[in-house]
Image (spheres, rainbow, N blue to C red):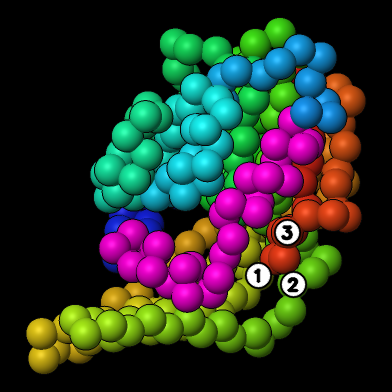
Amino acid sequence: MKTDDFEVFAEYYDKLYLKREKNYKKEVKILRRIIREMQHRKSKTLLDVGCGTGSHLKYLSKDFHCTGVDINKKMIKIARKKVPNAKFEIADMANLSLKDRFDVVTCLFSSIGYVQSFGNLVTTLENFRKQLTDKGIVIVEPWVFKKDFKKGTISIDTFEDEKVKFVRMATSKIAKSKWLIFMHYLIGKKGEIRHIRELHKMVLLDYEDYLKAFELAQFYDIKFLKNNLWDGCRGLFVARK
C-alpha cells in the first residue's frame, strides 16, 4: 500500500461507514468472545494493525492497553483524537517492528489485502508473530478470496451534509497476480466538484494460500471462522504463536 492511498478518503471514512451502519461496537463484542475462547491467560495488551481511524480501538481500549498502527498519516491523526487513551504509530505492516510485545494482534476490515503478494503476506505474518507475547493470539480478516471475484461489479457509496457531497465508485479487475481496484471520488464542496482517482493493488489469493502463509510464519492452532460473525465479515483467521 502506498502512503498516499486513502489520503482522499480519510476525511470522509467515518462518515461513510457510519451511514452504512458498520457496527464497530458489535464487532468488538465478537472479537472479545473469540479472544476469551482462545486465551490461556488473560490478555491485557492489543495491537491493531491497519487501524484506520481507530473505530475498533475505541471499544477495544475499554478492555486492553491498545496500540494502533497504520500507514496513513491522516487516519492516524483522526484516531489519536478519537481514542486518546491508546498509543498510535505510523507504520507499514510489511516491515513492522515495534519495541513492545502484545497478547493479541488484530488486522481487520481486510487491511491485510494491501500486502499485494503471497511472499509479502508471509513476511507480514512473521512480523505479527514477532510482536506477540508467548502463546499470543493473532486475528486477521482476509481480503476477498480469488474464487469469489466477480467481473464487472461496480460499487457506489455516498455521503452528504450541509458542507459536502461525496461519492465513491469502484470497480476491479484481475491482472496477473494482482487484484486491482479502481477508485473514483467525486467531492462537491464550496461550489466546486473535484474528481480524484486512485488505484489500489490487493493480494490475489485463496483460502489455501492464507493457510499456507500462516504455517510458513510458524503459527499453530490455525482456524478460519465463518459463523457467528458480523455482517459483511469475510471470515477471520485466528492462530497462536
Q: Amino acid at mark 2?
A: Phe
Residue at the image position 56 percent from the left and 83 percent from the top: 155
Question: Which dot, 2 or 1, sits closer to the camera?
Answer: 2
Q: Amino acid at mark 1?
A: Ile
Q: In this figure, what is the number of numbered marks?
A: 3
Q: Which region shows up in magenta? A: 9-35
Splitting the image into 4 quarters, where does residue 44 fall? top right
State the separation of the CA atoms marked 2 and 1. Answer: 8 Å
- Image coordinates of residue 78 in percent, x first then y, are 30, 48
Task: Specify whether residue 230 is painted magenta.
Answer: no
Looking at the rendering, in which quadrant would you find the C terminus?
A: top right
User: Residue beneath label 3, please?
Assistant: 230
Q: Tag on residue 174?
A: 1
User: Residue beneath label 2, please?
Assistant: 149
SS assignment for the magenta stretch, majority? helix
Q: Give the class, few, some or many, for how many residues have Cα within 10 Å of label 3's Cα (few <14, many ≥20).
A: some
Q: Give the class, few, some or many, for how many residues have Cα within 10 Å of label 1's Cα (few <14, many ≥20).
A: some
State the separation of the CA atoms marked 3 and 2. Answer: 21 Å
Splitting the image into 4 quarters, where does residue 237 fall? top right
Q: Give the class, few, some or many, for how many residues have Cα within 10 Å of label 2's Cα (few <14, many ≥20).
A: some
